[in-house]
Image (cartoon, rainbow, N blue to C red):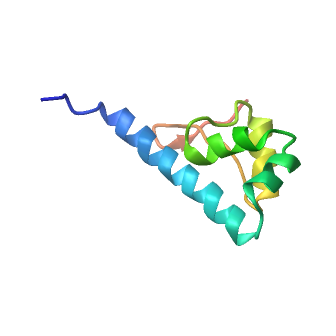
Amino acid sequence: MPEPPWPWKTEDAALETDLMMILIEQRKELGKSAHEIAREMDMSSAGYLQWEAGLAYPDRFSKWRRLARLLGLTFHVELRKGGVMVKPE
């Protein structure tokens, strides 16, 4: 019998599914094709479709921000320590 996945793997899989659905739903809501988004991101359609399929993700925050703008979303990263947001001094 296979061992159950570590809890963080389950969390990662859920987050990846959420991200995939957000990308697809938002793109469709805007009436754009994956090819159009890829062209606006200066990347191949195959590369963008990997993002939507959860096989790969943008490797830099600047790409996440650009993608968010194209899809009419906001992107920000929040780090917390003990429930308190960590801010640079």
Residue 53 image point, x, y percent: 57, 45
Q: Is residue 9 left or right of residue 47?
A: left
The quarter in which the N terminus is drawn is top left
Residue drawn at the location 74% of the way across and 31% of the way down: 60
Residue drawn at the location 51% of the way across and 44% of the way down: 16
Q: Please, which residue is most extreme toward the left here? A: 1
Residue 17 image point, x, y percent: 48, 50
Residue drawn at the location 44% of the way across and 39% of the way down: 12
The quarter in which the C terminus is drawn is top right
The quadrant in which residue 73 appears is: bottom right
Vertical position of residue 21 compared to residue 41: above or below:
below
Q: Which residue is nearer to you in this view: 89 or 43?
A: 43
Q: Is residue 14 left or right of residue 87?
A: left
The quadrant in which residue 57 appears is: top right
Vertical position of residue 80 compared to residue 70: above or below:
above
Residue 83 image point, x, y percent: 47, 43
Q: Is residue 46 left or right of residue 55?
A: right
The mark total stands at 0
